[in-house]
Structures are given as C-alpha cells and as structure tokens.
Amino acid sequence: MARRWWAVVATTVLVVTTAGCVDGGASQLPARVGQLPEQVRGLGPAVFAVAVADERRTDLTGLVAVERFGDEIAGVAPDRRHAEIALGDPRFPTVADGLAEDRRAAVLTDGRIVDVALPDHVYLRTATGVGPQLSITGPRCLIVRPDGTVEQPAVEAACVVADHGGVIWQERPGDRFGGVDLTTGAVSPAISLPTYPFAAAPDGRLLAALTDERPARLIIADTADGSWRPTVEVARTFVSGVFTDAGFAVTHLRDGLRAVSVVQPDGVVRTLLSPVGDVTFAPAGRYALVEETGSGARRLAVLDLTSGSVVPVTEAPEPAGASPAGTSPTAPAGDAGRPGPTDLPPVAGSLAVAVAGEAALVVELPYDADVRRDADLPNRVWSVDLASATARPGPDLRGVSSATVLPSTGASLAALRLGPSGDAMTIDTAGTVTTAGSLATPRTAFPDGTVLHDLHDEDGELRVDRVLLTDGAGHRTEIATGGGSGQRVGGVLATPDGAYLLVSLRSDRGGSRPPGPEDALVLVRRDGTGEPLVLYQGAVLVSLGLTTE
C-alpha cells in the first residue's frame, strides 16, 4: 500500500548524484549500476527521465517507470519516448508533456505515471513544491494539485513563491496578478496593481504590494472584487510583514514611533504595539518576536498577531540530566520535576534573528565600543519557542560582531552567517540549533534535527565530492557523494530507514539535454562511513513513492 513520503521523510535521506567515476559508454545507459542493499526499505515505485533514441534521433528524453526503486531500468520499454518534463523534488507531483508523435501528457506522482490532458502552449523546465502534494511549474505556470488535476492560470502566466509568503501568479505581459491557495491549489482572479506583489495570503485571495508613489504606501488587494487602497507608509527598500488571519501585519511609523499594526482588507489599521524595537515575524502569521521597550528596558517578548497580547520571553532552566543546550526543545515550564521559568535578561546589544516555523534563533551582538574593548566578548544565544514564549540557551559563542540572515532554503530551516568568522548557525522548526564552519552553506533540515550543508573550497567554489551534516549536539560529519568533474549535487533526500542519504548528481552543463553519463543516483551512509554506492547512471529521478514494508 502506497504511503506519502511526506509522513516518513524524517527518517531517511536520499541523494541523487552524477557518478563521473563509473565506467561505461553512453550506449550502455541508462542502467542500474549497483544493487540497492536489502536493509534499505520503504522505497516504492519510481519514475526516471532517461535518454531515448529512435531511428532518426538520439537526443530525446523519455520516461521509464519501475515498480520499486532499485529495480533494473536497462532494457525497460519507455512509457514515454519523447517528453518535456518539469524537474524538481521527486517527493512532489510534477508533469510531463508529450512531444512529436506521442502527445500523451502525464502527471507524475508517488512514482506513478498518470495520463492527463494539459492545456496548449505549456513550457516545462522546473517544478517547485509549495505545499503537501502541490506544485507549480516554470517558466510557464501550471498548478499541479493534490487531486492530480492541473490548471493553467493564463497562457503566458508565471508563478513565483513570494518573498513574504504565499504564491503569486502574473498574467504576462502586463501588471495583472493573482494568488494560489496553498492547500487546494485553487487560483484567484488576476487584478491590476501598480507594483509587483511581495506577499500572498495562504488562500491566495489577498495580495500585498506597494504604491508607486513616494513615500510608498502599503496596498492590501482583494482579488475577489479587485479592490485595493493605499494604507500606511512603509519603507520602499524593505517591508517587514506577514499575512495573518485578519490582514497583513507590518512594521511602520506611527506618530514618529515604530509600531506593529495589522492592516485589514478594508483599509482599517489596527495597531497592536507601539513603541517597539526590532520585530521579526514568524512565517505562519501567528506570532512576532519583538523588542518590548515600554518598561524602559529592552526585553524580548512574543506578540500574538491575532489577540495583540504581548508575553515576555522567559527562560526555563534545563532539568537535571537534560541534553546539552541546542540539542532539542525542553518541555513547557511547569511540567513535573522542572523548575519554574526565570526572566530573560534585558537586551544589552543589537539582535540578529532568524525564524523557522515558530522557532526563533536569537544572537545578541555587542555594540562597536564593546567590540573594540574586548574582541573575545561572549555572545548570548537563545532558541525561542514563540508559541510558549520560552527560551533555551544556545551554543557557546564568542567574538561575533555581526550576523546576516541567509536567504531562505525552505520552510524547515533558517540560518545566520556570523562575522567575522563566517561560520553558519541554523535553527529548524523544532528549535534545534546547529553550527557549521565558514565553508558550509545550509541547504535543508531533516525532521530529526540534522542539517545538510553544501561545502565550498578555499576559493569559494562549490564542492561536488562532499556534503556536510550537522546536529544539535555539535557533531559535524562530512559525507562523500562520489561526484567529480562535470557534475553538481542536485537533490538530497532521506531514506525511510534513517541510515542513508540518496544523492542526485547532475551534469553541470545545464540546459534541456537528455540525461547522460554524468547523471546518477548515489546511496551514501549517513554516518559518513563506507564508499558511495552508485545505483543508477544515465537517469534522473523524477518521481518517487513509498511503501509500508
């Protein structure tokens, strides 16, 4: 019986790679190169993109399906001999459009090929998962829904994941925009706006944008009736805000003081807190971590964006025998055998904050004068659970004078780049904090709290031969991928048994060429021991299902 990868991805990592060290000419590909070990279980049906030749051409891309990942693909008759495929994470659904004589289109989901009718004028290259079993394609947009249906918002539509949350689609050419419901995939009508929206509500109905005047004003647009109106003044270069159940929560100036307000679709502005210091919004729109200044001291607090309540952040001591700080969240204060919470000390410097889910990583930075006086000054680090307004001490840190929030790599992870060392510090949605060196760039978090990083060499070039795993206990494990010259590391997934990573190696030539010798799937041990095992060569994993075995 099939089961969603979504439910079990926490336990295993799968890495797909291009194995340049594997012998064999292009005429022998695609092929299964190695046997999947018997102890790797739970991998079900799979669909691969492979090179297919006919009597006239050798540069066609087709689809091969097998009943179980690990089965032989050499000699298997292609299900599609010439197709344009939107490639992405194989855990999410995607689509393929039939070309030439075989015009059959398909949805690829859970390792199966399902016939479907696609609209005309599609152009497929990439697929991006934006919700459970929901994807968008590019460069021309199709919405691939959980029920297997596909919708084209408009012939020339483009879809993007918005900077401040949600999915926006644009009717090109022009200035008409709509949203996408992240649960159902329903598409809202397109409306005209003066600037490109930077956020969409989770149901796709409301959009946030700016006026084109100076100073800029926030617009909350309702796609249901096309209405919008200018509201509060905001900085044009950077807007700090998020959609909530009631509207768009935003920081702005009110009577010369910084404030957090919720702007409703009808233009009504409800101020929740003013004055306020630094503000960082959680992406789900329920909470914000704020510097509360009303008491005269600067203290961390959690602002509930629905009720408007402000709860000071407290720190509960670790119980006897607890894991080291930064490994896993503590239970809420008040549990049997745990001491009660204590007040978090007032903020004494500036703050760097990164938020994943409802967990916030907070690093206190000293002021310049303090740095000049003591370059080895200790930094205070907290992992804050916004739902309970409690903080745990993070890893020991010294001499950090600056920190930059790294671009988002997905909803499961947030990260800071610390200066002057260049080290990376991450937090996942469970509040687990990990650290990595300056040559590591966080890629994704796995459900067990480990974090996968790309590695760079001393010249800043991305390495293909190794990746890095870190955890909240401070362990750092380099893992050989088997990659080499002419390759790059594509997707990395976890296997359900928890012991392996499946790495996808891809050719670094890019373009729309069919898979070749550089494209491979490699199995590696998560503990870094043993040699990489090349499973498939000349193939790209497009869709993967799981079983309950």
Image (cartoon, rainbow, N blue to C red):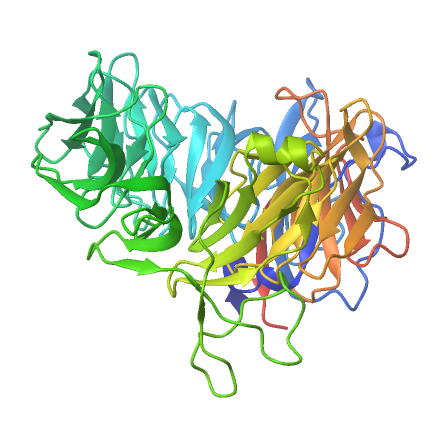
Name, please, the residue furthest toward the bottom. Answer: 336
Measuring 86% from the left and 32% from the top, which residue is drawn there? 20
Residue 446 in picture, x, y percent from top left: 61, 55
Measuring 65% from the left and 30% from the top, which residue is drawn there? 372
Is residue 74 among the parts visible in the rendering?
A: no
Which quadrant holds residue 490? Answer: top right
Measuring 68% from the left and 30% from the top, which residue is drawn there? 52
Picture layout, residue 394 above or below residue 47: below
Looking at the image, residue 549 sits to the left or right of residue 500; the answer is left
Taking depth in this image into account, of 436 and 540 the one nearest to the observer is 436
Quadrant in which the C terminus appears: bottom right
Number of numbered discs visible in the structure rendering? 0
Taking depth in this image into account, of 371 and 405 the one nearest to the observer is 371
Picture layout, residue 312 above or below residue 211: below
Looking at the image, residue 7 sits to the left or right of residue 518; the answer is left
Is residue 199 among the parts visible in the rendering?
A: yes
Residue 209 in picture, x, y percent from top left: 24, 25
Taking depth in this image into account, of 230 and 531 the one nearest to the observer is 230
Taking depth in this image into account, of 47 and 235 the one nearest to the observer is 235
Looking at the image, residue 336 sits to the left or right of residue 28; the answer is left
Name, please, the residue furthest toward the front. Answer: 373
